[in-house]
């Protein structure tokens, strides 16, 4: 459990269905710049705490719940009620007639002080005060109506007063059925019975294809400019420096020379994917896509809910594993299996783009991504044949489509950039440093010779072993193939390069992702996951090699 309180009436728990506006309330009431004020499902994967501004109350935000769901996030949210002193029921005013009775049925509020917050006040202006009065009389608890995405000072004051006067719900209140019209969210082509799924699939492709294309064009334009105006002058300045320093900074695995490739090719991908994801999440489009594709996802042993973490994996596999907590217990392990194999993280995308472009084969990126998806689905079906699917939900809280708020979008992108600068780049620079030390000590040649039989069996140069070794540590370890100013890449055919990048990408998840899987599921599952992925990777690499039939 994540909620602990030692003083009476200190913890106020926000509980409600997904997309009800809880995260926006948490942000507005605590002042925490979470950037998670959008209305997409699964936005609150982990329980968060913060002090309610200008009060002595602690506000607790738990994951949104789903009806008849067995996911970890739903269980966590319902169990959190036992440790809460005050419970704030968060329900969309537009759907109160349906969602409030269902929420009261789903959670146990016995002997709990409760108040009700009706959100999405901006979506309906008619009868809000009458609606609040009706529920106050019906339940016998304080009721407030707010626009959670834009809390005013008066709203915050009213919510504090409601929390202070919270009380137990009347015992017989559940027998009443409130009559209030439901305001349905907009209908789009994504909900069309015939064209909805094809358009949703196109939306998924565009969601990631356009950012990657823009990132590639930007990196391809910048590389010769920076090489000419920055890298070459730095090499000139260090020409007379001690050999060890030259090797460390501008050698084959130099921090400046090789480290630059990591930043140049990965950073634009991170930026553009971050913007694209933030816009679709904040607008509510991403939820519509996942609902539409639920049927197709079930044909491959997953469901629409699993699509969210799988797509998140294209940004970061670690975050995606955590987000899979919102998946059904029946499909979560299958979802994680798909993430570790088929979801190319932003660093992997940037590294593979760099390798293919430096070798003069940028179009190889398209069949590369296609192969990851297709083989990933086959891999998942082979190793998770016994997984069962949860029945379809009988109630889905369809999201409203809304204009993305620049504040939320910019904070998401800011967070992604911060993670890249402070976490991703230091790790890759460390890889460059370790590779340089191994090269100076002569161990890099030793590792290459150790892997020589395997590399020769697949018709790869021995020097390419470093890419596989470092990609196990981190997926942008692929960038070590750029050493010696691309001499190794020039010596390889397009077929060899394609299979090498594919093998290095899929042989296993990176160590950070595997460590996260271990923490979530235990060592046995993580070890089994790594072993199964290694088998699939090697077998599929051989099949691709035979299909490509390169000359060597």
Image (cartoon, rainbow, N blue to C red):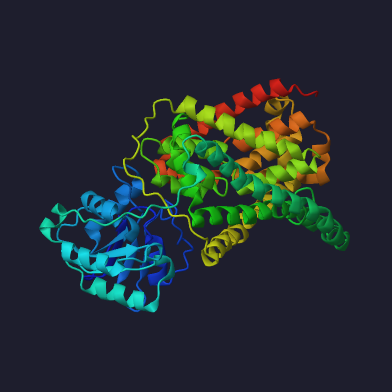
Percent position of residue 205, x then y: 60, 42
Name the quadrant containing residue 57: bottom left
Name the quadrant containing residue 420: bottom right
Name the quadrant containing residue 132: bottom left
Residue 469, compared with residue 347, is above or below; it is above
Which quarter shows the N terminus?
bottom left
All told, the count of numbered labels is 0
What residue sits 71% from the left and 44% below the top?
Answer: 353
What residue sits 50% from the left and 50% below the top?
Answer: 285
Residue 391, compared with residue 268, is above or below; it is above
One can see residue 303 in this view: yes
Q: Which of 157 and 380 is in front in this view?
A: 157
Q: In this view, does 488 lie to the left or right of 287?
A: right
What residue sits 19% from the left and 57% below the top?
Answer: 109
Percent position of residue 180, x then y: 26, 57
Q: Nearer the viewer, residue 253 or 485?
A: 485
Percent position of residue 439, x then y: 74, 45
Residue 345, compared with residue 198, is above or below; it is below
Q: Is residue 295 left or right of residue 138?
A: right
Percent position of residue 363, x then y: 75, 38
Q: In this view, does 258 lie to the left or right of 32?
A: right
One can see residue 461 in this view: no
Residue farthest toward the left in the current orientation of the protein: 172
Which quarter shows the C terminus?
top right
Q: Which of 46 and 98 is in front in this view?
A: 98
Q: Which of 219 and 156 is in front in this view?
A: 156
């Amino acid at each position: 459990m994540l909620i602990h309180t030692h003083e009476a009436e200190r913890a106020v728990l926000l509980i409600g269905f997904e997309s009800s506006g809880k995260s926006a309330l948490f942000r507005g009431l605590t002042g925490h710049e979470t950037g998670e004020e959008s209305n997409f499902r699964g936005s609150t994967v982990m329980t968060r705490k913060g002090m309610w501004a200008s009060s002595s109350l602690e506000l607790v935000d738990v994951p949104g719940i789903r009806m008849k769901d067995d996911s970890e996030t739903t269980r966590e949210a319902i169990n959190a009620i036992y440790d809460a002193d005050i419970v704030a029921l968060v329900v969309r005013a537009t759907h109160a007639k349906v969602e409030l009775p269902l929420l009261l049925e789903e959670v146990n509020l016995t002997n709990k002080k409760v108040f009700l917050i009706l959100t999405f006040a901006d979506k309906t202006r008619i009868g809000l005060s009458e609606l609040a009065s009706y529920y106050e009389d019906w339940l016998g608890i304080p009721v407030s109506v707010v626009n959670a995405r834009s809390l005013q000072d008066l709203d915050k004051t009213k919510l504090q007063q409601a929390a202070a006067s919270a009380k137990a719900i009347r015992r017989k209140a559940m027998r009443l059925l409130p009559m209030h019209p439901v305001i349905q969210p907009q209908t789009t082509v994504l909900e069309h019975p015939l064209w909805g799924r094809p358009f949703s699939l196109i939306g998924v492709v565009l969601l990631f294809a356009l950012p990657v294309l823009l990132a590639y064009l930007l990196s391809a334009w910048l590389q010769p400019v920076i090489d000419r105006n920055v890298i070459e002058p730095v090499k000139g300045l260090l020409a007379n420096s001690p050999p060890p320093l030259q090797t460390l900074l501008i050698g084959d695995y130099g921090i400046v020379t090789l480290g630059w490739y990591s930043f140049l090719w990965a950073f634009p991908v991170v930026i553009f994917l971050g913007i694209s994801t933030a816009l679709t999440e904040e607008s509510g489009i991403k939820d519509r896509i996942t609902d539409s594709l639920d049927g197709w996802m079930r044909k491959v042993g997953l469901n629409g809910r699993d699509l969210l973490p799988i797509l998140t994996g294209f940004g970061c596999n670690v975050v995606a594993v955590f987000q899979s907590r919102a998946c059904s217990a029946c499909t979560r392990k299958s979802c994680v299996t798909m993430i570790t194999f088929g979801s190319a993280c932003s660093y992997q995308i940037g590294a593979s783009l760099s390798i293919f472009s430096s070798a003069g084969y940028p179009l190889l990126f398209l069949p590369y991504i296609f192969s990851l998806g297709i083989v990933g689905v086959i891999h998942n079906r082979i190793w998770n044949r016994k997984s069962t699917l949860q029945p379809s939900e009988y109630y889905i809280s369809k999201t409203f489509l809304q204009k993305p708020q620049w504040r939320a979008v910019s904070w998401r992108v800011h967070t992604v950039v911060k993670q890249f600068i402070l976490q991703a780049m230091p790790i890759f620079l460390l890889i460059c440093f370790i590779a340089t030390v191994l090269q100076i000590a002569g161990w890099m040649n030793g590792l290459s010779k150790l892997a020589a039989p395997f590399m020769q069996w697949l018709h790869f140069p021995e020097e390419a072993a470093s890419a596989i070794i470092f990609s196990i540590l981190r997926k942008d370890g692929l960038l070590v193939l750029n050493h010696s100013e691309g001499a190794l890449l020039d010596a390889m055919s397009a077929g060899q390069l394609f299979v090498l990048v594919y093998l290095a990408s899929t042989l296993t998840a990176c160590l950070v992702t595997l460590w996260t899987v271990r923490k979530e599921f235990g060592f046995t599952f993580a070890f089994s996951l790594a072993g199964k992925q290694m088998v699939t990777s090697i077998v599929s690499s051989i099949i691709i090699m035979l299909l490509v039939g390169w000359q060597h």
